[in-house]
Image (cartoon, rainbow, N blue to C red):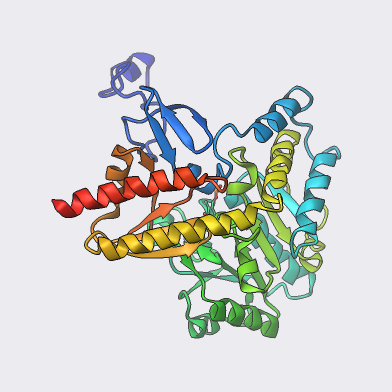
Amino acid sequence: MTPQAKNTAPGTEAGSNPRAALWPNYKPPAELVFTHGIGSELFSEDGTSYLDFLSGIAVTSFGHAHPHLVNALTEQATKLWHTSNVFRIPAAERLAQRLVESSFADGVYFANSGTEAVEAGLKSIRAYQAVNKHPERYRIIGFEASFHGRTMASLAAAGNPAHMKNFVHGDYGFDQAQWDDIESVKSCIDENTAGIIIEPVQGEGGIRPASKEFLKALRELCDDHGLLLMFDEVQCGIGRSGKLFAHENYSLEPDVMAIAKGLGGGFPVGACLASEAVSSTMQLGSHGSTFGGNQLAMAVADAVLDLVLEPSLLKDVNNKAKFLVTELEALTKKYPQSISSVHGLGLMLGLKCVGENTKLLLKLREHGLLVGKSGDNMIRLLPPLNVSQIELERALDIIRTVLKNSEAN
Ligand SMILES: *Cc1c(COP(=O)(O)O)cnc(C)c1O
C-alpha cells in the first residue's frame, strides 16, 4: 500500500479512530481513559474518580502507586534494568529462594506473563516424563471452561473452541475432561498421558472453586498413574484466595504451578514453580526467555512479596472477604430478580446475574465502580487485597443503589 492509500483508507483519517493503528483484537470502552491511580482509585481524563474492583484483572493487588512498589521500581530503575540470563541475576536467585521457602516448590523459572509461566509448566511435565524414561507420555489433560492464556499450547490446554478457532490445529497433545467429574478424567487417561493441568479456582470460566473431593481425587489419580499435577494459579495465587496460594485451601500440593498476575503488582512477570523431581528435569538449554527474571521485574516482585507476606495481610483479606460475601449474599436475597448467588474464594468473587452481566457491569461503571465479567454470566469482583473497609462499603453502596434502581424499573 502506498502512503497515500494508507492515509485515505476509510475510517483511518487522523482523529477519526485513535485506535486505528492497533490490532482490533480488543474493544475497550471509548469514553474511559485513565490518567492516574492512587490505591483503589482510578482517575479518568475528565477527573472522575472510579473505585477499581477489577485491579487490572487481579494484577494490581496492592492498588495503584503503592509507595513500597514505586520505591522498589524507581530505585532499581536508576541502577540496572536488564543484563539477560547470560549472567547471574542475584535478585532472581533471592526471589526464587523466597518463593521456594513459601511454597511446596524446590525450583522456580521466571517468565514475563501468565501464559508463558503455563507454557513452561506444560513443557516441564513433558520433560519430566521423557527424562524419567517415559517419552511416550506426552498428553496433558485440561478442563472444560478453563483459561490458561493465549499461546498455542495454553489454548489447546484450555480447549475453548472460540479461542482456538483458526489457531490450533489437531489436539496439540491435549485431552479435555469435565469439571468436577472424576470419571471423565479417568476416561482420558491412557499410556500416553503425562499430567493434568487445572485452575484450583477457575477465573475466566466463572469464578468456580474446585471441590475439595475433586482436587483430592485428582491428586490421588496422578499418584496412582505416575502423572504430574499442575495448578494454574495465575489468577488465584499470591494472596487472592485468602491463602498465599489457592491450593493451600485444599491441604494438598501440586508438582508444578504457574503464577503471574498478582506477582508483579502491575509489572509484567510470571513464574513457574516445581518440585525438585520436576525442576531437575528442565536441563541446561531446555527452555529460556530473554526478559524472564530481569532486574526490574525481580525488584518489583520482591517488593510485592514483602507486602503479601506481611503477617496480618492474609488475615485481613479473609476478614474483608467474609464481610463482602455476607453483604453480597444479603443483596441476593433482597434483589433476587437481579443477582442470584455469590461465588469464589477470598477476594476473588463472582456475582451470578439473572439478567445480562454486561448490563449490570455498565450500570456499576456509570456509578463509579469498575468490575469485571466472567463466564457463566458472572460479575467478577477483584478488589485490591489492601482495599479499606470504607472502600468496601462504598462499593457495596454503589451495588445496592444500582440493584435498587434496576428492580424499580
Ligand atoms: C490471565 C490468566 C492466564 C494468562 O495470563 P497472561 O499474563 O494473560 O498470559 C493464564 N491462566 C489464568 C488462570 C489466567 O487467569
The structure residue drawn at horizontal position 49% and vertical position 47%, both measured from the top left corner, is 389
Nearer to the camera, 143 or 34: 34
Residue 354 position in % (x across, y down): 25, 62
Could you say which quadrant of the image residue 235 lies in?
A: bottom right
Q: Residue furthest top?
A: 4
Q: Is residue 353 above or below residue 262?
A: below
Q: Is residue 376 visible?
A: no
Residue 379 position in % (x across, y down): 36, 54
On screen, residue 41 versus residue 108, left or right, reads left
In which quadrant is the N terminus drawn?
Answer: top left
Q: Is residue 183 above or below residue 396?
A: below
State the count of labels: 0
The structure residue drawn at horizontal position 63% and vertical position 77%, both measured from the top left corner, is 192
Q: Residue furthest left?
A: 409
Residue 233 position in % (x across, y down): 59, 59
Nearer to the camera, 81 or 403: 403
Q: Is residue 273 above or below residue 385?
A: below
Nearer to the camera, 399 or 265: 399
On screen, residue 222 versus residue 159, left or right, reads right
Residue 322 position in % (x across, y down): 50, 61
The structure residue drawn at horizontal position 34% and vertical position 19%, both measured from the top left corner, is 6
The structure residue drawn at horizontal position 37% and vertical position 41%, both measured from the top left corner, is 369
Could you say which quadrant of the image residue 112 lies in?
A: top right
